[in-house]
Image (cartoon, helix red, strand yellow):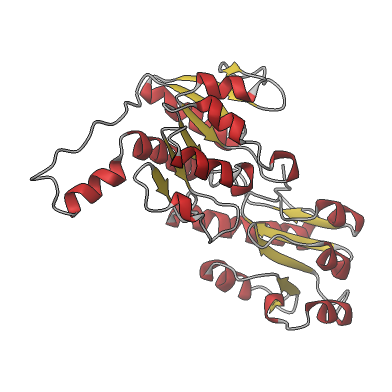
Amino acid sequence: MDTQTHLLQIGPLPPGLEQLLQTQYRLHPLWKEADRAGFLAEHAGQFAGGVTMSRHGCSADIFASLKGGVVACFGVGYDGIDLNAAAQYDVQVSTTPNVLNDCVADCAFGLILATARQLVAADRHVQAGRWASQAFPLASRVSGKRLGIVGLGRIGAAIARRSSGFDMDVRYYGRHPQAEVAYGYEPDLHALARWADFLVVACRGGADTRHLISGSVLEALGPQGFLVNIARGSVIDEDALVEAIAKNRIAGAGLDVYAQEPQVPPGLLNNDRVVALPHIAASTRETRAAMEQLVADNLHSFFTTGRIITPPG
């Protein structure tokens, strides 16, 4: 690969990915430019492509400055990437699907167990030395319960498969039923929430799903129901969730993602009924290495064959 191929680095990257790409390309850190618009205008057409992360996205002005080429995204989410602008300026976009499915699904089930069985609160109880003088309260069983999945894509399907080990009944909500799966399809999200003991959000982000989990959906989930989100923070109306937690309208929540990361609504902190993770569902050494390699593979494929390997979707 031509080591002089120039790529725009749209935001900070994981150190391993940045080191890997620097062996093959010349990266320019766009986020360090004080006058981003001026830089893009001055250097329009000089970069063969770009590299970003789901959290950074990629806006129309960047695609316009590339006018052909490729943008490789580290991450499966692409709601922050302007795909219409990518098509307009003939820029191919890649993401890193599949390689993170298992770890994200593992984390979803970890949150199911942690919220229902109050594992984090129980640990605090022991660590604080309270066990000797105060019994820990009863929690909720997971095995045999009803699991509702919002979005039965690759990750949602991996979550559903794991539920078989817990003898759970599974139903899912999505844009349309999937003929090839045996799980029950529920076309009404509120009905799914009323039915479910655990409502797991695994759909894509973006305008179409913004605040899909509304106050009325949380009301339908009810005081015995648990919410788990490993998708995108924007899918949940966080104000409604804070209110539902404060007023005991749901049993608890396990969250890995938030609307304004790394900011977490104060009403979701310091509450034993909320397990809050710092967006780590895919953060294992094995998955990180596979995602980094897939970014590199997509770029290599584009520059050698003219086509990326894993487009969004």
Q: Residue at x 74, y 45 (%)?
A: 207
* Left/right of residue 16 with respect to residue 189 in the rendered view: left
**Residue 150 appearing in the image:** no
* Left/right of residue 281 with respect to residue 190 in the rendered view: left
Give the x, y percent position of residue 67: 89, 65
Residue farthest toward the left in the current orientation of the protein: 132
Kindly indicate the quadrant of the structure image that contains residue 245.
top left
Residue farthest toward the front in the current orientation of the protein: 247
* Left/right of residue 43 with respect to residue 109 in the rendered view: right
Nearer to us in this view, 79 or 302 = 79
Give the x, y percent position of residue 292: 57, 60
Quadrant of the image containing the N terminus: bottom right
Give the x, y percent position of residue 127: 19, 53
* Left/right of residue 247 with respect to residue 208 in the rendered view: left
Q: Residue at x 40, y 44 (%)?
A: 274
Give the x, y percent position of residue 138: 24, 31
**Residue 103 appearing in the image:** yes
Above or below — where is 179 with respect to 22?
A: above
Q: Residue at x 81, y 67 (%)?
A: 62
Nearer to us in this view, 43 or 148 = 148
Kindly indicate the quadrant of the structure image that contains residue 305.
bottom right
Residue farthest toward the right in the current orientation of the protein: 88
